[in-house]
Amino acid sequence: MSQLSQKEQWASKIGFILAAAGSAIGLGAIWKFPYVAGTSGGGAFFLVFLIFTLLLGYPLLIGEFVIGRHTQSDAISAYKKLAPHTLWHVTGWIGMIACFILLSFYSVVGGWIILYLFRAVSGELGGLSQVQYGELFGQLISDPFQTLLAQFIFILLTIIVVAKGIQQGIEKASKLMMPALFLLFLLLVFRSMTLDGAIEGLKFLFVPDFSKLTSEAVLYALGQAFFTLSLGVSVMVTYSSYLNKEQSLPKSAISIVVMNAFVVVLAGLAIFPAIFSFGMEPNAGPTLVFAVLPVVFNHIPFGSLFFIAFLILFLFAALTSAFSMIEIIVASVAKNDAKKRQSATWLIGILIFIVGIPSCLSFGVLADFQVFNRTIFDIADFTVSNVLMPLGALLISLFVSLKIAKDTLFDELRQGSTISKLFFDIWFFLIRYVAPIAILIVFLDVLGFLDF
Ligand code: PFF
């Protein structure tokens, strides 16, 4: 390839959709959603999350796609092209910083999956009770050497794939991993829902009790909606910049939203019935999934084999999300230079690992180091999920509706599809008014300025 090669593109329609869905579907749906729903009121949280996903997430996803495909540029240059000599490209910087911090703690959890996988393969995870799994997992994640090594391996895998580029790396990997994940989840859901007492778990997830919905829970639902769709950080701007004009943006966006919501529901259906059936509490926090799922697999014939398969796919789901986090930074640094891409990916990956070390240790030696009752890991997560992502989403919604001409927007939405004027008007209304106002209200409410 020449030094300054032509801009790479996705090889196929489905390749782009799966890569974007791969970015969306990850720890957010499988690991984070269950424990945040567990501590934030279950059904009511889930309902608010779904509403945010449809009314804010879907329009914003289209918005990020428009910016990316229209400019065919990385996250910083895209804003510069559309609004030259302004400060709007700060939005791209917020995305890059958010993704940098995000991967620094995301890789910690990715590392936990790797550690569990090793244990499962060596046969150490079979036949324990959920209390024993909880204890074992607690010990595992407090061991500094193992967790740091596993975190490093997770980042290394991310670097190796992303350094290869879009088609050969990210697209190929996503096409294989995502469908397999769906299938395995179905099996898990079936088993969990046929456990004794599963119905209590379904009630917890689907029957909303609004008395449990605090303003903080609403913020978490908003953060979670953006987090699971990878929104607000210009990752979707970057991914859609490799997209040609034949693809329909609204259609691609809806497939991603639906697939993602489907996995969120599947994860909920796999986990909550089991939690209630085993008499556990749903508010165990970040370790929840790791203590519950192995027990469900113990109740399945050949469970230990399925558990290994599940962990591999869980790891893949986390990796496809990690690819997108590093890709946004690499794309902005390397532009379309294939050689620079290699070195940039390595350098950025290693820096992220170093920055992530305190997050990793905050489940062990640094557990007592807390600010406002939060560990370093929690602070990193809160900063990204509940501050930077909603802030980025606010800026993007304003940018799309204020800085791109309405005709251009309509043209972009119509490329590759036939959408009605009504669809366009509703979308525009949602992104121009509903999204920014809703985000502001949720922010102000949490800061205590509103009295809901
Ligand atoms: N959507 C990913 C998940 O749910 O695990 C997390 C994520 C990936 C957030 C990439 C943001 C991002 F840019």
Image (cartoon, rainbow, N blue to C red):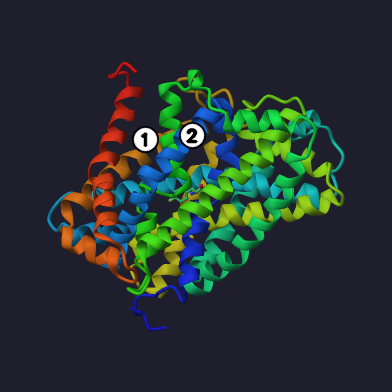
Q: Give the Cα separation between the discs numbered 2 and 1.
A: 21 Å
Question: Residue 323 in the image: x percent, y percent?
Answer: 50, 58
Residue at position x 47%, y 22% in the image: 213
Question: Residue 373 in the image: x percent, y percent?
Answer: 50, 20
Is 417 positioned to the left or the right of 264 in the image?
A: left
Q: Residues within 10 Å of mark 2 (few under 14, many from 20)?
A: some
Task: Give the amino acid type for the residue marked by disc 1 in the picture.
Answer: Val
Q: Residue furthest left?
A: 85
Q: Secondary structure at mark 2?
A: helix
Q: Secondary structure at mark 1?
A: helix
Of tags 2 and 1, the one toward the viewer is: 2
What quarter of the picture does the C terminus occupy? top left
Work out whether residue 311 can be spotted: no
Work out whether residue 147 can be spotted: yes
Q: Nearer the viewer, residue 263 or 114?
A: 263
Q: Nearer the viewer, residue 190 or 181?
A: 190
Q: Is residue 17 above or below residue 212?
A: below
The residue labelled by disc 2 is 47
What quarter of the picture does the N terminus occupy? bottom left
Q: Is residue 436 above or below residue 21?
A: above
Is 282 positioned to the left or the right of 99 in the image?
A: right
Q: Are marks 2 and 1 in contact (CB under 8 Å)?
A: no
Question: Residue 215 in the image: x percent, y percent?
Answer: 40, 23
The numbered dot on residue 387 is 1
Q: Nearer the viewer, residue 401 or 170?
A: 401
Q: Nearer the viewer, residue 169 or 147?
A: 169
